[in-house]
Image (cartoon, rainbow, N blue to C red):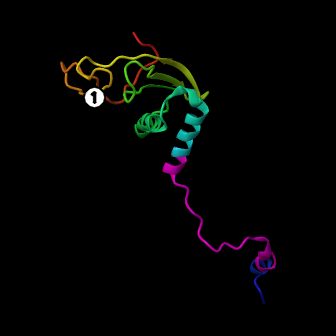
């Protein structure tokens, strides 16, 4: 005598797809890169902010477990004569502000070349800065 549930499963087995290869796991790193690239693409070509610069800023924030709605990036790979400060609304995926930003007096002339977190160095500090709701 055949077990009824097993017989029903065997009868309807043709409905289920045959899986010949194990499913490929979705890498969270790949998914994150896709999200970063999508936001960057939605910002448009005229912002002049390189994808690697945007990706580094975005991933730095995510690595620290933060979920900001707005991201400000001072792109120190651009000369001081360029509008290299970008304020980006991550929710609406749009550029809010692009403006000039200076670097420290001992950082370099046209291009920022030297950086330091040492007090009194008069050099620009690299890194991530968390800004609250209100800047006083």
Q: Position of residue 122 (x, y in %)?
A: 22, 18
Q: Quadrant of residue 9?
A: bottom right
Numbered circles on residues, count: 1
- The residue drawn where x is 51% and y is 45% is 33
Q: Nearer the viewer, residue 50 or 25?
A: 50
Q: Position of residue 80 (x, y in %)?
A: 37, 20
Q: Quadrant of residue 128?
A: top left
Q: Position of residue 21 (x, y in %)?
A: 61, 72
Identify the magenta region: 9-32
Q: Position of residue 76 (x, y in %)?
A: 37, 27
- The residue drawn where x is 22% and y is 20% is 106
Q: Nearer the viewer, residue 64 or 24?
A: 24
Q: Nearer the viewer, residue 33 or 21?
A: 33
Q: Specify few, some or many for label 1: CA neighbours under 10 Å numbering under 14, 14-19, or 20 or more.
A: some
Which residue sits furthest bottom?
1
The answer to whether one can see residue 69 in this image is no
Q: Is residue 86 left or right of residue 123?
A: right
The answer to whether one can see residue 5 in this image is yes
- The residue drawn where x is 31% and y is 26% is 112
- Label 1 sits on residue: 113
For the C terminus, the quadrant is top left
Q: Secondary structure at mark 1?
A: loop
Is residue 128 positioned above or below 131 on the image?
A: below
Is residue 39 found inside the magenta-colored segment of the image? no
């Amino acid at each position: 005598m055949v077990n009824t549930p097993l017989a029903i499963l065997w009868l309807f087995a043709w409905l289920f797809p045959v899986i010949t290869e194990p499913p490929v796991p979705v890498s969270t790193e790949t998914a994150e890169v896709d999200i970063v690239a999508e936001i960057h693409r939605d910002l448009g070509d005229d912002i002049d902010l390189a994808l690697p610069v945007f990706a580094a800023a975005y991933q730095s924030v995510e690595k620290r477990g933060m979920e900001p709605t707005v991201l400000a990036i001072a792109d120190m790979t651009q000369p001081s004569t360029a509008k290299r400060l970008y304020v980006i609304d991550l929710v609406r995926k749009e550029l809010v502000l692009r403006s000039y930003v200076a670097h420290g007096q001992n950082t370099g002339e046209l291009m920022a070349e030297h950086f330091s977190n040492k007090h009194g160095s008069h050099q620009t500090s690299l890194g991530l800065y968390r800004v609250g709701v209100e800047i006083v």
